[in-house]
Amino acid sequence: MFQNQLVSYSGIQPSGNLTIGNYLGALKNFASYSEKYKCFYCVVDEHAITVRQNPADLRRRTYETLALYMAAGLDPEKNTLYVQSHVHEHAELAWILNCFTMFGELSRMTQFKDKSARHADNINAGLFTYPALMAADILLYQTDVVPVGVDQKQHVELCRDIAMRMNQLYPDLFTVPEPIIAKSGKKIMSLADPTKKMSKSDENPNAIVYILDDKDTIIRKFKRAVTDSDTVVRYAEGKDGINNLMSIYSCFTGKEFDEIEREFDGKGYGEFKLAVGEACADALAPVQKRYNEILSDKAGLEAQMKKGAEEASYVARRTLSKVQKKLGFVQVR
């Protein structure tokens, strides 16, 4: 579709303040993909409403997420940056894919089980069929690769199953995508409970470091990070807290674990935690500065939303039209 250029697709929900887990596992790596792929980066606001959202907060975070994409280095001239609800083909293809997705497949999705437990008063149909919408997001652009965190890999695998199932019925309908999981930063854990993933919905503010936290806040949170009764900075089984801090430090500095162990040989946890906090804050400072500049230009962000939606719609329309034709829908021009 893009003159033999491979296609990459990814999306982030505007449903909360983004964490360093989002940054290290996704945003930080995104800019490099544009050198190899035709990239689509979406603010997936339709996914966000599977959990009740305050409308004003959702609107604000939609602008903020787009601004963070750009602040993290995504050039709008090299990448298609847009908002999901501005491209109606996502919802249209999602309904079609719902009809080719098995109930049992959706029942096995780990995220549905987790979110159902957390939001027992709102187990809605959208929460259940969320993976079909995610599959539509990906398949609309004949995507070759999908950069995702470990927690979303299951959804990409289901997307592949749906694509292959439909390709058997209607040959050459979809490109079957492959997930890409970054080797570093693929799963950043909570600072308060390092056996759990860092989550922007965590009720404990000390468990999370947000991309937009100021330097003092970042250092304070790292100083309070849970570790263990040992005093040696080394990566080992049973040292979940230190392992997590070493992973974070490695991501921000580019240093390997053995190099980190040598750097802090004979030094205590306090000194190490401070170093991790400073490395994190220093790395995020230019992103925060650029973010504030972009966010202050609301008209510029809205112009990008419109431009991105037009680019995405042009491609999405072609795929949706192809699918509708294959399925036997009457098309009137």
Image: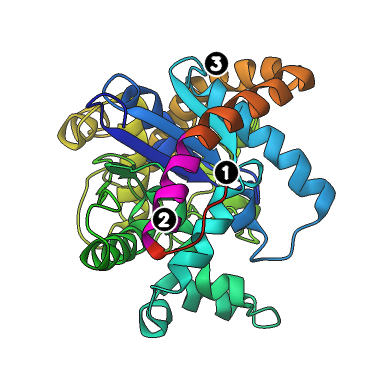
- Of residues 329 and 206, which is closer to you in this image? 329
Instruction: Residue 333: give its label.
Output: 1
Q: Amino acid at mark 1?
A: Arg
Q: Amino acid at mark 3?
A: Pro
In the image, farthest residue toward the left: 258
Disc 2 + disc 1, Cβ < 8 Å: no
Q: Is residue 224 visible?
A: yes
Which residue position is annotated with label 2?
A: 325
Q: Amino acid at mark 2?
A: Lys
Residue 61 location (% of width, % of height): 71, 41
In the image, farthest residue toward the right: 56
Q: Is residue 195 visible?
A: no
Q: Quadrant of the C terminus?
A: top right
- Taking the magenta stretch, the answer to whether it contains residue 45 is no
Q: Magenta residues?
A: 315-326
Which residue position is annotated with label 3?
A: 286
Assess disc 3: are there few (<14), some (14-19) or many (≥20) residues with their C-alpha within 10 Å of its C-alpha: few
Residue 191 location (% of width, % of height): 48, 52
- Of residues 312 and 291, which is closer to you in this image? 312
Q: Nearer the viewer, mark 3 or mark 1?
A: 1
Residue at 22%, 45% in the rendered image? 234
Rounded to the nearest angstrom, the CA distance separating label 3 from label 1 is 49 Å
Q: Vertically, is 332 above or below 168? A: above
